[in-house]
Image (tube, rainbow, N blue to C red):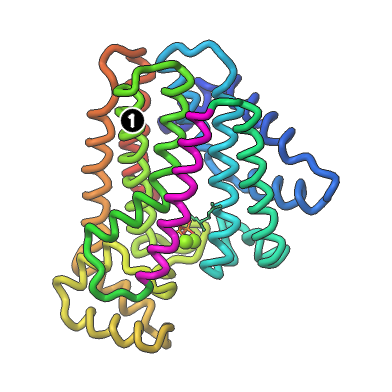
Amino acid sequence: MISPLERATELCRMDMERVDACIHENLQSDIMMIPAIGHYIVNSGGKRLRPLLSLLIARLFDYSGDRHIPLSVVVEFIHTASLLHDDVVDSSDQRRGSPSANGVWGNQASVLVGDYLFSRAFQMMVADGDMAMLKLMSDVTNALAEGEVLQLSRTFHMEMTEAECLEVIERKTAVLFKAATEVGAHVSGESADVVADLADYGMCLGVAFQLMDDALDYLAEAEEAGKPVGHDLEEGKITLPLIHAMQRDAELRKRVEDIAERGCYEDGDREWVRERVTAQDGAGYAMQRARDYAERAKLRLPENSNSEIRLLLGELADFSAHRPF
Ligand code: FPP
Ligand code: MG
Ligand code: MG
């Protein structure tokens, strides 16, 4: 059976082709390392979920202009820049089943090409010429950077609560989904209330998406996930599956405290922690919370809009909270 993501991609095929063309056009530079790394990362099997959301929402309101194409690329470029930086920050040498850009070209090149993409996104917004859009994206990227710094400052933070964990998720991940959906509603000329509802839909879908990612770090095998698993705690990230399990298992909490003191895993830590988190159904709890957020997202979709697209957006929210393997 084909997934809602595949159906949405097919439905927006012509617009998605324009998005791809716009991506490639904006990766041109006579500094060869820029298109080389840019193409490597944008073609590395990402789902283009964020641009797709912008396109679908423009379609939800029968938008007939062109602005959604470059503006959805703006969101994708900011996302891609953040991934280039993220794999450096997280010392991660794998992404989407392949070596990460920093694994191939090194940290310096990854950071600098990330900067290129980030600044390119702002050039594209200036070309679009809408101060409201610049405000939206500058606020979003600021929140994104704050979210990452907040997460860093909570490295191995044993007192991390569910609320703090959700705050990090909203800022580091969900804001870009919010930006994507807000773009679609904004270019369509919808009222401030409707734009806010769609922004909330994006935010909730984004939280669901990251909660699933956090659950899979404890559930999936590396081959399935296309990146290292059991890695979050090693990086000092106290995510929801672990918070849930530590509240119920004092021995697990003690072992995590020891890991935090050492700042790294010793032989057997990864497997032991994964087993204990699984025994408390930590990942199951995070997935349940993801489903709650998907339900909240669906409630924000406006009644008086294209019903076929509304249904599909609802299915995409569910899909973000569903276990892919
Ligand atoms: C993936 O999370 C990374 C993010 C959601 C955002 C990363 C953002 C930055 C590094 C800030 C960059 C800022 C600008 C303005 C370019 P993860 O590490 O939990 O997930 P992963 O498993 O996909 O690596
Ligand atoms: Mg990472
Ligand atoms: Mg990270």
What kind of residue is marked 1? Answer: Glu
Q: Position of residue 72 (x, y in %)?
A: 55, 31
From what the image shows, is residue 286 above or below residue 231? above
Front in this rendered view, residue 223 or 231: 231
Query: What residue span does the magenta drawing correspond to?
Result: 131-154
Front in this rendered view, residue 15 or 273: 15
The question of residue 298 being in magenta is answered with: no
Q: Position of residue 220 (x, y in %)?
A: 39, 60
Q: Which residue is drawn at 39% across and 70% down?
A: 153
Residue at image mark 1: 315
Q: Position of residue 23 (x, y in %)?
A: 67, 35
Question: In the rendered image, which quarter is residue 176 located in?
Answer: top left
Say whether residue 46 is left or right of residue 248: right
From what the image shows, is residue 225 above or below residue 48? below
The question of residue 153 being in magenta is answered with: yes
Q: Position of residue 244 (x, y in %)?
A: 20, 65
